[in-house]
Amino acid sequence: MTGLDGLSGLSHREDVAFLEECNPPLIERNAAEFRRLRDLLVQVGEPARRAETRTEWESEGSHTYTARLTEARLLVAQMAEGYDKAASALNAYAAAVTTAKSHYRNGRHTERALAALIDTKGVAVTKVARAAEPMRRWEDMRATTGFLDFLAEATMDVDDIREEADRLHDAAGGSFHLAKTVEAEARATCVHALKQAYELLPEFKVPGGGARPDLYAAMADIRREAAEAAASPLTHLPGSGPKRETAPPPGDAAMSPALRDIRMRISSLPQADDSYWDPPGDDEERARWISHNREVLRAAAQHSGLPDELVAGIAWKEIGGQYGVTDDLTDTVRGAAASPLSPVAPRELPWRLGGTPDETSFGPIAIQLRRGAEVLGYDPAHLTDAQRVLVEESLQDPRQNAFVAAGYLAQLKAEAGYGDVPAEQLTDAQMREIAARYNGGPYWQSGKAQDYGDDFGDALGKVKDAMR
């Protein structure tokens, strides 16, 4: 954005394009997790208060007992306050993102009108001009910037559209600027509040810097208490899988906690069939693949709080796609096209090769690398080489692939507004929608994505049979 744009209150779409990926329901889902923890701590606070104020202990050490109870109660109260503050901050940010996205949509609508008006006067010649957003194209037409553009625009008479194009340009830029301002101010406020919330939480350190002891695994009483509390709504949000954090063992620093947890979980599961060299070609082979891998698919579904048939149904659709070796070839070609020396951009590659390296799908249940990275807790925009290798390896391993796919489906379930719906209450229609979102992403309402969802629904009977 130029200095002039900043003074005039205009922004370009590229300044706020990230709003396409922002999803208020997911932000609210995270807020709900913090609120759940607040409620859990508040519930603990009352028994702690009773133990502190109503217990009479006559001994030389009674003052130590009372002091420890007071410390524990204040610690719980402080933690509850921190989680409450974090939940409020995220809910406020979600509301602001909703507003920002509405401004962004207004800008996109006006931008399309500007593009249609510009197209009445000519076609962009240079590669840069073709890829430019309409606001940039109009700015380019108003002030010729290159020899090829000069040749293309030499015979153009833009005076008759100038007034309307300027109006649309400024209206789009104004909407984008509103979106940028609303989100940026809300984000700054949210981050500040989250830092305050974080400071309210205690920092537990293990002497010597070692790994935290896994008390859950070590103490049978804790495991029994966890099993008894599993039905409580305070132990996990409705519609989500069971909560179970594990202490990360020493290992690869590039491995995220989420990936480490998945690899620990699959260690007790049977080996899975792969489809790298020979994907199923018909329904009979698909059913055989689903049946052989049903334990893995079921474990992945339960871990993410999903119906077994949703994960297995997506697998049914995806495993008959293309060979795994084709994914590797696509990734290699796209990576080469992304080189600064390549004459062709990755998105301009022919056929299904077109797309960025991070959009390449891997694994029997096809998942784009950037989506897999998100599920595993990485920032797709800043993946290190070591992290990228880990993500690719995970997606190509059938067992890990199932858990990552289930994690992404759980995210789509929340995006669709069904985050609070328990797995056993999710309807076939809701699963069809989630399947369409899996296929179409932001364009899940397109005909192609809707057909995918319908095909998923039509195969559910066969999928359920294969999972028995």
Image (cartoon, grey):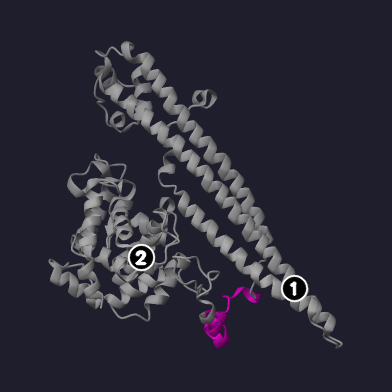
Residue 443 in the image, given as x and y percentages of width and height: 30, 46
What residue range appears in magenta? 207-226
Residue placed under numbered mark 2 in the picture? 406
Label 2 CA crowd tier, 10 Å (few <14, some 14–19, many 20+): many
Label 1, label 2: how far apart the Cα atoms are: 41 Å
Of badges 1 and 2, the one in the foreground is 1
- Residue visible at 28% across and 17% down? 150
What is the secondary structure assignment of the residue under circle 2?
helix
Which is more N-terminal, label 2 or label 1?
A: 1
Residue 409 in the image, given as x and y percentages of width and height: 36, 61
User: Dominant secondary structure of the magenta stretch?
Assistant: helix
Question: Position of 211 compared to 76: left or right?
Answer: left
Q: Three-letter amino acid code at disc 1?
A: Arg
Residue 106 in the image, given as x and y percentages of width and height: 41, 32
Position of 247 relative to 61 (above/below): above
- Residue visible at 27% across and 28% down? 126
Q: Nearer the viewer, residue 381 or 176?
A: 176
Instruction: Find out whether residue 214 is within the magenta segment.
Output: yes
Image disc number at residue 128: none
Question: Position of 67 compared to 410: left or right?
Answer: right
Position of 287 relative to 343 (above/below): below
Question: Position of 274 compared to 262: left or right?
Answer: left
Residue placed under numbered mark 1 in the picture? 49
Label 1 CA crowd tier, 10 Å (few <14, some 14–19, many 20+): some
* Quarter of the figure with the C terminus: bottom left
